[in-house]
Each structure stands twice: as structure tokens, then as C-alpha cells.
Image: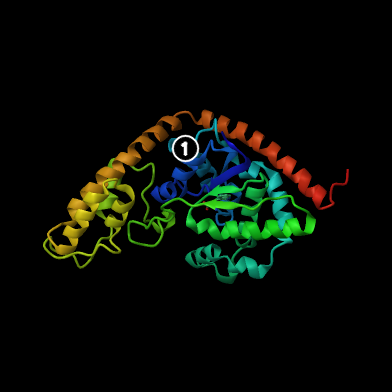
């Protein structure tokens, strides 16, 4: 039985192929949750992708298909989840404009994820307005479909909080149109990069892609940050902050053996290569079927476009209905 009162929605910015961080942070969770609710939507967030890629439209365009391939390869099923393109649902843009009246500049500047991204990109006061307001547009992404179950990684939590602020304001001014939105965090909602950096990110160059070959996976794991003071095999090594052990904790199902390896590593006598080899095998086992399914699906790009086209039409109908209701509530339903 599906929960009739809930609508699931999630999405990705099409600015690069997706990586292991996306996989454990949200894709695995969205695949597990699809089918449990009345409706489920997956959005290619191209409008959001353009907020920091305005000068790079072909990058966004080319990656639209890549993120869909990644999600399909991981098991998101078009029979259960409606795939659509954000820019093809103009009702989202319309709703964004209405929501902008409900948000202050001070609130926008306080969003910690936006703040982090602005620092990382070196924007400062020169941030473009579209980027600064993208959480408002994200609220519209969600509420245009009256979605209330959002499986995302932990960095998206501030956006969901902002969505709830906006919908409360909307409801209090114009009447109860929207219901509270819940985040569905996965067990591992943030994966460190292979360099030990707090977040895996393609732009930081520390990611393992879901499309990486076995050779590339091996090369990347061999480069992983471990413990720089662990020089000789017999030296005692540190487990904390050691990326290989952090990954084994997440991806290795044999927790007992991992605990033994940790003890041995801390005592001394266990080389990095041994634990890296173990991790290489585990990651190759996870990624190989995804990569192979991805390669198979990529042979038929028309089929992917057909999925998107049919899904976008369906999604647009839902958004149209919501906007009708929104405009009525806002007293701008003239004709
Ligand atoms: N901000 C998300 C990301 O960077 C993508 C996204 C856009 C999204 N709109 C959304 C996620 C709505 C969940 C719900 O990955």
C-alpha cells in the first residue's frame, strides 16, 4: 500500500556526472523509497544548475542526460518515479516569483549551504541574484508538486528548512495550501572526498564517479588520504580521519573484520596497501553493475528523452493544478 497523503520529490543539478557521495547521500535512499508514496518525482534541476553556470549552458545541457543515466542505473524506475526537466515546467518559475515576496534578503544570506558554496566559489557580494535565491526556487520545485517527502543529503537540510518557512508564511497569508515538508536523510548523508576533504565534490576533484572504470577506481583509492605519519608497515597508524577506514565503515558489510583491521592498524603491522586493496574490491563490486547498466542505457539516448518527455508532461499537469490553487488563494485568478 502506498501512502496517499505523501508525495516524494528529489532531484540533481545537472552539472556533472554523479558520484559515490550522491549515491550514499541520497540516490540509494530515493530508490528505496520510491513506490511507497502516492506519487514520486525526480527532477533534473537545470534551472538551478544554470545559477552558477550561466556562461556554460552546454555543460548543463550535456549533463542533464548524464544525471538521468546515473539515477536509472542506480535503480530509479520510471514506472514508479516521474522523471522531468525543471525548465520545462514554467509553473515552477512562476511560483518562485510569488515566493520571493515571502523571503527577506537577510534570510537568504543566512542559509549555511548557500554561504558555504559562495565561499567555495569566491563570490562575495558579487554573487548573482539567481544563485542567492536558488533555495526559494527549490521551495517552488517542491511545492509546485505539493511534495512533502524529500530524500536528500545533509547539505540540503537548510533548503528544506527555508521551504518550510516559506510555506508557513504562504499558508498564514493566503490559507492552508501546503503541508509541512520532511527531509529523509540517509544513514550516510555526507561522504568525505578521497583527499579527506569534508565533502566529496566533482569540482573539488576528490570524487569517485558512478561511471568510473575499475582502473580509475583503483587509481583513486590508491591516492586516498590515510595517515601521513604511518610511513612504515610496522608503525602504528591512525584510524580517525583516515579516509580508507571511513569508507570501509560505510561500504564494508563485514564490520567484525573491519574492527580487527582497525585494531591491527593502530597497533602497527598493517600496511595501507592491504586496506586499500580491500576497499578497491568493495567499491568495484558496488560500481560495476551501475556502470554497466549505465553504459547499456546510454546506447539508446532516444529512450531517455522519451522518459523525460512523458514525465515532464505528467509533472506539468500536477504543477498546473497547484498553480491554479495558489493563484486562487492569492486572489490573482482573474478570468
Ligand atoms: N539542490 C539539489 C542539489 O544540489 C538539487 C535540487 C533542486 C533538489 N531542487 C530540488 C533536491 C528539490 C530536492 C528537492 O543536488
Q: From the viewer's side, name the closer residue of 327 and 60.
A: 327
Q: From the viewer's side, name the closer residue of 73 and 282.
A: 282
Secondary structure beneath label 1: helix
Furthest-front residue in this view: 1
Which quarter of the rendered picture does the C terminus lie within?
A: top right
Give the image location of residue 214, x and y in percent: 29, 41
Residue at point 55%, 36% (across, down): 81
Please name the colour scheme applied to the rendered image. Answer: rainbow
Residue at point 20%, 54% (across, down): 261
Image position of 55 (left or right of 211): right
Disc tally is 1
Which residue is under mark 1? Answer: 69
Residue at point 52%, 47% (across, down): 14
Residue at point 81%, 53% (across, down): 330
Give the image location of residue 224, x and y in percent: 28, 56
Mark 1 crowdedness (10 Å alpha carbons): few <14, some 14-19, many ≥20: many
Which quarter of the rendered picture does the N terminus lie within?
A: top right
| Disc 1 residue: CB within 8 Å of ligand 1 | no
Give the image location of residue 188, x and y in percent: 41, 53
Give the image location of residue 228, x and y in percent: 23, 66
Is 97 above or below relative to 324? Answer: below
Image position of 46 (left or right of 252): right
Amino acid at each position: 500500500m502506498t501512502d496517499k497523503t505523501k508525495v516524494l520529490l528529489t532531484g540533481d543539478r545537472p552539472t556533472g556526472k554523479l558520484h559515490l557521495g550522491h549515491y550514499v547521500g541520497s540516490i540509494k535512499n530515493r530508490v528505496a523509497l520510491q513506490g511507497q508514496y502516492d506519487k514520486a518525482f525526480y527532477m533534473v534541476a537545470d534551472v538551478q544548475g544554470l545559477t552558477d553556470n550561466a556562461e556554460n549552458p552546454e555543460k548543463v545541457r550535456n549533463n542533464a542526460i548524464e544525471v538521468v543515466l546515473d539515477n536509472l542505473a542506480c535503480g530509479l524506475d520510471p514506472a514508479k518515479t516521474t522523471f522531468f526537466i525543471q525548465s520545462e515546467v514554467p509553473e515552477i518559475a512562476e511560483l518562485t516569483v510569488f515566493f520571493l515576496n515571502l523571503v527577506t534578503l537577510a534570510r537568504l544570506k543566512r542559509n549555511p549551504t548557500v554561504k558555504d558554496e559562495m565561499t567555495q566559489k569566491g563570490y562575495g557580494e558579487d554573487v548573482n541574484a539567481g544563485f542567492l535565491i536558488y533555495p526559494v526556487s527549490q521551495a517552488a520545485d517542491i511545492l509546485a508538486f505539493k511534495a512533502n517527502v524529500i530524500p536528500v543529503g545533509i547539505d540540503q537540510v537548510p533548503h528544506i528548512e527555508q521551504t518550510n518557512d516559506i510555506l508557513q508564511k504562504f499558508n498564514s497569508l493566503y490559507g492552508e495550501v501546503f503541508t509541512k515538508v520532511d527531509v529523509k536523510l540517509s544513514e550516510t548523508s555526507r561522504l568525505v572526498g578521497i583527499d579527506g576533504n569534508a565533502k566529496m565534490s566533482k569540482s573539488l576533484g576528490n570524487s569517485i564517479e558512478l561511471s568510473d572504470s575499475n582502473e580509475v577506481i583503483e587509481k583513486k583509492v590508491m591516492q586516498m588520504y590515510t595517515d601521513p605519519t604511518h610511513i612504515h608497515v610496522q608503525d602504528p597508524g591512525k584510524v580517525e580521519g583516515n579516509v580508507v577506514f571511513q569508507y570501509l565503515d560505510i561500504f564494508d558489510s563485514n564490520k567484525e573484520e573491519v574492527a580487527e583491521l582497525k585494531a591491527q592498524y593502530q597497533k602497527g603491522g598493517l600496511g595501507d596497501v592491504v586496506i586499500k586493496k580491500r576497499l578497491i574490491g568493495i567499491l568495484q563490486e558496488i560500481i560495476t553493475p551501475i556502470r554497466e547498466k549505465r553504459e547499456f542505457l546510454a546506447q539508446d539516448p532516444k529512450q531517455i528523452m522519451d522518459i523525460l518527455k512523458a514525465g515532464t508532461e505528467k509533472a506539468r499537469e500536477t504543477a498546473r493544478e497547484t498553480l491554479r490553487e495558489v493563484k486562487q488563494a492569492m486572489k490573482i485568478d482573474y478570468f
